[in-house]
Amino acid sequence: MHEDIKDYRSVVDPGCMKCLDCVSACPTNALALKFAKPQILNRKPKRERKPRAFDLSWPEEIGLALVFLLTLLAARGLYAVVPLLMAAGIAGIVTFFAYKAWRTLRVENVRFHGFQLRLRGRTTRTGWVWLTFTTVVLLLVAHSLAVNQYRWRADHSFERLDLSKAALFAPSPPPFSEEQTQQFQSTLDLYNRAAPIGDGGIGLAPNAESMLRMALLHLALNQHDDAVVLLDRVEAIAGEADELTADREQVRILGGLAVARLAQNRPGVTRPEVEQAFASAREQTERALDNMRAALDANPDWWATRERLINTLNQTGRAEQAITAADEALEALPETSKYRRARSRALLDRSRAFQAAGRFEEAFQSLQEAVETNPRDAVIRENLAAAYAQYKRDPDSAIRELLTAIQLQRSSATRYERLASLMISAGRTDEALDAFSEALKRVEDKAAFAERIEQNLIRSDLADLAEQWRERQAEWLGD
């Protein structure tokens, strides 16, 4: 400031904050706030200013920027516990450590607060401690970066796989080719490399998100016991959760069924061995049912576990028990807005149980109650649409409910294809073609989808509609 006053007779430095502290603190009242000539009219100073000095050179600035970037990448999402802002803070701290360590090696005198790190060209004992600590931190960053790169590669590979949890959890999961199996195994190997050292990896802690994906990969490889172990470990890390409990018990049931089917198809197997394998599968199912009942006793609003329990009872021919389980859920859940979703899903489950028991009118009434309880649930609306079409033979009402479901939730090609089928049964062929077109937009293999729809229409004696569809798809796919 005093240099500006000497050269220009006013403060012209853009760094001035205009706080006027200098005016109030001047002992001779030599400074004041008043009008002055614009800076462009001021004469140039007689002496040249000293060049501005910087603490770091350009190579050093770039090096520290790389330290910050690599530390950010190493910390971001590490073990599924470090969010982006926290990773940025860690990167800033590590960069400061690296900066001070570099200065300690290069500058004659270096201090950090009250600690002398280097004095007269010699590193002090505190400086050596600083250098050692910084080295350990940088090695830890490098290790974390290695762990994360395995996880990134595994996640990228997993996202490219055609793995559907719904398909894997079906009683008869889809078969996979040898090439797909190899892709599953290679992806699993990448996750295993990022796993903790005790599990054969290089990591220092488990990653719950990765373990969930690993469980799906084990399930696709028919390694059900390993999948159950992983889900148990996720529960130990993250705590009990509704969907986690439902998934784990479904995997347990599927594991028993897979072993039984394997024993049944094994060459030279005896009948007692097959019976023993299926008895073991039934034991696994009963254990899973007991675990789900225990979880629901403690958490009556866990609708995913309740849905899995009722579906399992339906699949094992115990529809009346499924109805009882749904009724117990409705009794346990208060009729408040907090439990609206859970109550509506319990009503949906009860409807499915009524359907399995052959009590179709009660199934339809239960679905109507579910819609009244939670009118903005797209899944329930879709089920009510199916009930209108199946039980009431009322395609117009079914279309209305399915359109509502589509408005409530971003819909897949399957939902639009179902809508088109309902519109055909209602005689609304133009709208059916529009629905098929919306479905076509949402599939990857558009040519195969269009061909399948055309063949289905021909088999249904709808040759005219098939011709219109052929013309419509030509607009999308070309001649």
Image: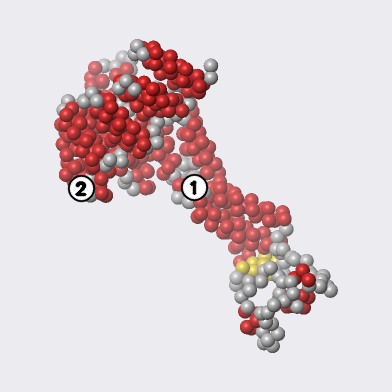
Q: Is residue 410 left or right of residue 130?
A: left
> Is label 2 in a helix, a strand or a loop?
loop
Q: Quadrant of residue 395?
A: top left
Query: Which residue sits at x=23%, y=38%?
Result: 370
Residue 477 lies, in percent from the top left, at 51, 21
- Where 153 sits versus 118, above or below? above
User: Residue 77, labelled with which disc?
Assistant: 1
Residue 144 lies, in percent from the top left, at 53, 47
Query: Which residue sits at x=60%, y=62%?
Result: 130
| Residue highlighted by disc 2 | 335
Residue 335 lies, in percent from the top left, at 20, 47
Decide: few, some or many residues near mark 1? Use Cα within 10 Å; few <14, some 14-19, many ≥20. Answer: some
- Where 141 sits versus 182, above or below? below
Pick the residue in front: 19 or 464. 464
User: Residue 267, labelled with which disc?
Assistant: none
Q: Earlier in the sequence, mark 1 or mark 2?
A: 1
Query: Which residue sits at x=68%, y=56%?
Result: 61
> Is label 1 in a helix, a strand or a loop?
loop
- Where 354 sits versus 114, above or below? above
**Res. 285 visible in picture:** no
Mark 1–mark 2 distance (CA, rounded to whole Å)? 40 Å
At label 1, which amino acid type do we have? Gly
